[in-house]
Each structure stands twice: as structure tokens, then as C-alpha cells.
Amino acid sequence: MKTAVEQRAGAWCVLFYVGAALALGGAAMTACEDDDPKQRPRSGNGQGTQEPEEGFDPGTEGPSGPPAADAGGLCGNRIHQVEISEAPNIYFVLDASGSMLSPASSRETRYDRVHEAAVDLVRNLGPLINVGAAVFPLDATDEAPCRPGGEVFPVTPGAPFAERQEGSTTTSRFRSATRVEPLGGTPTAATLAALTPRLVELPGKTIVVLATDGGPNCNGSATCDADECIANIEQQCPEENCCALSGLSGPEGCLDRDDTVAAIERLAASGIEVYVVGIPGSEFYGDVLDRMALAGGAAQFVSPFYFKVDNLDTLGNVLSKIASIVISCEFDLVDPPPEEGQTNVYLDDKLVAYDPENGWRWKSPAVVELLGEACAKLKSGRVGQVQIVSGCPTEVAR
């Protein structure tokens, strides 16, 4: 699914300083562009310097940003309408079991911190992603703690770069939909099985980000010995097999390892990678989380194969790392420039030089691709606006 970025129509002039004129008193020749292609500047050699009417220091290497929206109506500079090439679907599956109420700080629970990090990612990446979410369990009660989870936010395009307000944006709606009160068990297998048909039908690339603070359980038919008994695993019971005791057996007492791994394998077989994130509280379950990560086709290269988060302050960085794997740095231009050598790219009003290593390049006559450092900055979620502008000679890395 493609998301259009807001198009701005600007008007400004390009100043070409001519040596002879400068020698005669510092005069400047002004070349203005209007809607007549015959009046547009000829293709440059890629080494000209463009200068906005205001805010430009002649002692610097280049302009500090794109042209103002209106520079006196003298010229019409073209800011291209762009589309994100194949924005991936990032689908959060968030553990909302009772243990997620455990304090993560003096004022926040584990779930608060996971929720906050997910919302930040959605806000920061904007139209680079489509986002959806489910929580598990959903609508659990003390009498029915193992109800399967379900979708709370259908896959939705991220908000445009220029749309930073809250209100009805994707970010605010995502925040509201995923704000739940944790309660109950951890029905991971049943939740993933219920979500699979919906996820498989989504167009484009889809990944699942599964964040949990413990091991899966809630298998109503499970029986287990000490090795698979949650109370034993978490060292809460001195008996040889805690789950043999009355009150500790049942759906919440036994680890649901095999069914959970099988549910993840089915998703992976359908082309949907599952990224497993284990937050504090999940330390006892490293082996099962590793198996889940390997089954999901998105394991890290070395153990731990899942994304282990020891400090929730680093969770945002982990989510950004996962998202960066699938985010595209290509932009399709709806209205490609008519001339070569007259286009520049800006990230948050900062010029990005044409550079096949760390800047940008034309991948085709209608596709701009960010590379190296520029692509990494975009994928980090630290870019609020992308502008692709024609009407001035392309700035090339020196």
C-alpha cells in the first residue's frame, strides 16, 4: 500500500552569481522558473549552488533547507509528490497478561513501557510503514483468564511526514486502541492461530512483532512435569513438580511450548516473519523464546536468537532496529522532473547531497533512492519530513 506525502507548491528564485558581474560590484543575475518549460533553467552539471532568498550564508557550503513556500511569486519551484515504495505492514502482537502489570518504574508498568515504545515507533516512522496491532488475552476476566487475544487496530497507513498533529492521526488512534489493562494468562498459540487468516490476506510485506514478558501458556489440554511447569521454571515452588499440586496445574500452569512454536511456523510458512521480543520478566524462558524466534524466520545470527531486552529504556531502539530491516528507502515520484541535473533531496529541511554511497541517487527516471547514512537516518525514525525538489542544479557530494 502506498501513502502519498503532502505536496507543497512553492515559489522562489535561483540566484546564479556570475564572475564578471561580481567583479563589477557584486551584482547577481536572477534566473526564475515559471510554469513554461522553455523558461526553466537548463540542465546543470550537478555542481551549481542554489541559494534561497533568505537565511543563506555565502560562507557555507550550501543552503540550509528547501525554498520557502513563497519568495515573492517570481518563480515556481517544483516539490514533487512522492509515494513510499511498498510500505511494509508492521503488526504488533502485545502481551497483555497479568504479569505485564509488574512495575517497570515508580510510575509505569511493563505494559506501559511497551505501549509507549510501540506508539513512538508508529509516530516516528509515519508513512514509511502501515501498522496494525493485537493484544493477548483480549477481554479476559478472573473467571476466564485464557481468552485468546485479538485485533484491536486494523492495519492502517502511517500518517504523512508533514502531519505532526495528534487528533485523528494514525498515531493517536493506535495509542488509544492499544491502551488496555493487563489481566489473565498468556494464550500466545491461540492468539496467533486466530490472527493467521487475517495476516495472510494482507497485501505486501508483513512482519509480526511479538513482545512478551514470559512464557506462553493457556493450553487447556496441557499436562506437564517439572521441566514444563511454569512455577518450577520461575523457581516459585520447592516441590519436585509444582504442577502436580492442586491449584497449580491446568491451562495457566504448564508451558505451551510446542503449540506456540507450531503457530509461529505456520505464519512463517505463509511468508510472514515473526520477530520475538523478550522484555524483563522473560529471562526464565530464553530457550522457548529462542525456539519461537527460529521458527519465525527472523532470528538473530547468534544466541539469544530472540531480541532480548534487559532494560526497557532500550526497547525503542530494538523496535527501530526491527523496523529498519523491512523499511524501504525508495520513493516513487508521481510527477518525475522533466530535466536532468535539476533535482535535490531534503530530510527535515537539510540538504542531502547526490552521493551513491551516503546520499541519494536515481534508481530509475521516476525513483529516488536514499543510500548509506541518509537511508540509515530515515530508517531510524529520526526524519520528520522528506522533500524532493526540482528547479535548481543538483548538489553533488564534494
Image (cartoon, helix red, strand yellow):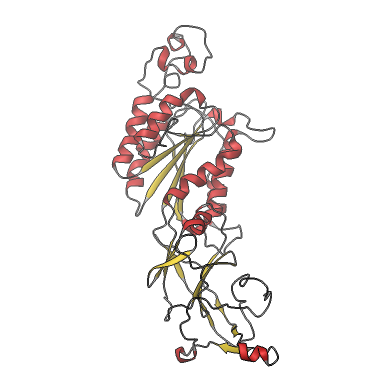
Figure quadrant of the C terminus? bottom right
Q: 242 and 320: which one is in front?
A: 320
Furthest-left residue in this view? 269
Q: Does residue 338 appear to the left or right of 29 in the view shown?
A: left
User: Relative to 241, is 116 above or below?
Assistant: below
User: Relative to 57, is 2 above or below?
Assistant: above
Position of residue 185 measured from the top left corner of the image (x, y, whole percent)? 48, 27
Residue at the image point whose x is 55% and y is 44% from the top? 317
Residue at the image point whose x is 40% and y is 34% from the top? 293
Position of residue 160 measured from the top left corner of the image (x, y, whole percent)? 52, 62
Asked where in the image residue 347 lies, by quadrant, the reply is bottom right
Residue at the image point whose x is 51% and y is 30% from the top? 213
Query: In the rendered picture of this protein, how many numbered marks are placed on residues?
Result: 0
Figure quadrant of the N terminus? bottom left
Position of residue 297 measured from the top left corner of the image (x, y, whole percent)? 35, 39
Furthest-top residue in this view? 239
Q: 190 and 206: which one is in front?
A: 206
Position of residue 103 measured from the top left corner of the image (x, y, whole percent)? 63, 30
Q: 272 and 255: which one is in front?
A: 272
Q: Does residue 24 appear to the left or right of 146 in the view shown?
A: right
Question: Can residue 190 be seen here?
Answer: no
Question: Can residue 379 be seen here?
Answer: yes
Q: 360 and 141: which one is in front?
A: 360
User: Relative to 52, is 135 above or below?
Assistant: above
